[in-house]
Image (spheres, rainbow, N blue to C red):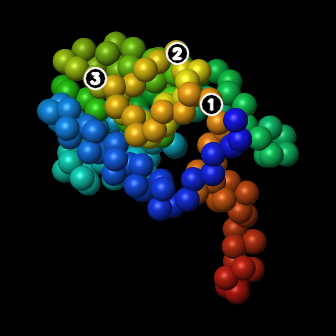
Amino acid sequence: MADLYVSWYDYHHAIERLAAKVHASGFAFNQIICLARGGLRVGDMLSRIFNQPLGVLATQSYFANADKSAETQGELTIGQHMAKINERLGDRILLVDDLVDSGKTMQEVVAHLRHRYPGIKEVRTAVIWKKGCSVFTPDFWADDLPHNPWIHQPFEIYDQLKPEDLAARLGAA
């Protein structure tokens, strides 16, 4: 299948559709945890829509090749600490990311959260895109992509942008 190119409008609209599905489910969560970097914008929007606290857990499994023309999935690294405002973590978690590709990240993070935070009673997961090749099925998703396209998200233009190029483009010194 051809790559999927996502505009800012489509990106935000997909997150809104995801929020509507979570709401319709009746899941009464009291904490959102987003996986950085891909889930940051998703978590921020859902935190605002549902007026729930947001925690940020850094993960990394994709690495750019030498010329930054493509990324490949490698070993998952989960951050040692979670950034959050509340001293205590909620016990009913909505764990969000932008997508499940292989599904290994979501699978391992759910296990990590349950092990590290034994007070968690329930974890449900939400993503914008669920790929057909995923070994993990999230509880909520906006779009099902059974043919596993590579997704080009609108903010990825900043992966190639250098500060000096931006300054030149904007005419700033």
Provide the secondary structure element on which disc 1 rests.
Answer: loop
Tell which of 26 and 108 is nearer to you: 26
Residue 25: horizontal and vertical position, in percent? 20, 32
Q: Residues within 10 Å of mark 1 (few under 14, many from 20)?
A: some
Provide the secondary structure element on which disc 2 rests.
Answer: loop
Mark 1 or mark 2: name the one nearer the start of the chain.
2
Q: Which residue is mark 3?
A: 123
Depicted 110 relative to depicted 126: above or below: above
Gap between marks 1 and 2 measured at Cα: 13 Å
Gap between marks 2 and 3 measured at Cα: 17 Å
- The reply, left or right, for residue 4 in relation to residue 65 is left
Residue 94: horizontal and vertical position, in percent? 29, 32
Quadrant location of residue 163?
bottom right
Q: Quadrant of the N terminus?
A: top right
Q: Nearer the viewer, mark 3 or mark 1?
A: 1
Depicted 6 relative to depicted 21: above or below: below
Tell which of 18 and 31 is nearer to you: 18
Answer yes or no: is residue 84 visible.
no
- The reply, left or right, for residue 159 in relation to residue 77 is right
- The reply, left or right, for residue 86 in relation to residue 159 is left
Q: Which residue is mark 2?
A: 135
| Amino acid type, callout 1 | Asn
Q: Which residue is mark 1?
A: 148
Residue 55: horizontal and vertical position, in percent? 32, 40
